[in-house]
Amino acid sequence: MADNTDKVPDNAEGPFYVDSNCIDCDLCRQTAPDNFERNEDEGYSFVSKQPETPEEEQACKDALDECPVEAIGDDG
């Protein structure tokens, strides 16, 4: 389970976030490409934009469910 006290600094403000357990596997960026990006320098993903539509919210939830290291959280 993601730790909301250990969020990576690039996350957009809002309920979805990525914590420091991210292994940069690319799954979230493939699942929800409008909402996740990669920090090239540090090698992790982050929430670049909070979901604005039901489709984006579902994609973010799918990314959360599929994350192999449970680095994605939702405080919403």
Image (cartoon, grey):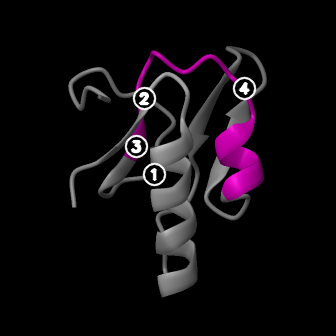
Q: Circle 1 sits on which residue? A: 12
Residue occupying image coordinates x 47% and y 64% = 50
Name the spot of residue 30 as percent of width and height, x first.
Answer: 77, 50
Q: Earlier in the sequence, mark 3 or mark 2?
A: 3
Name the spot of residue 4 as percent of width and height, x first.
Answer: 24, 32
Q: CA distance from mark 3 to mark 2?
A: 11 Å
Q: Circle 2 sits on which residue? A: 70
Name the spot of residue 15 as percent of width and height, x first.
Answer: 29, 56
CB contact under 8 Å: marks 3 and 4: no
State the extent of the magenta-drawn residues as a range: 17-31
SS at circle 3: strand
The vertical placement of 67 against 47, above or below, is: above
Q: Circle 4 sits on which residue? A: 25
Q: Earlier in the sequence, mark 3 or mark 4?
A: 3
Q: Nearer the viewer, residue 70 or 52?
A: 70
Whether residue 20 is in magenta: the answer is yes
The image quadrant of residue 18 is: top left
Q: Nearer the viewer, residue 44 or 2?
A: 2
Q: Is residue 40 left or right of residue 18?
A: right
Q: Earlier in the sequence, mark 3 or mark 1?
A: 1
Q: CA distance from mark 3 to mark 1?
A: 8 Å
Q: Earlier in the sequence, mark 1 or mark 2?
A: 1
Under mark 1, the amino acid is Ala
SS at circle 4: loop
Under mark 3, the amino acid is Tyr
Q: Nearer the viewer, mark 3 or mark 2?
A: 2
Q: Circle 3 sits on which residue? A: 17
Q: Is residue 12 left or right of residue 68?
A: left
Q: Is residue 53 visible?
A: no
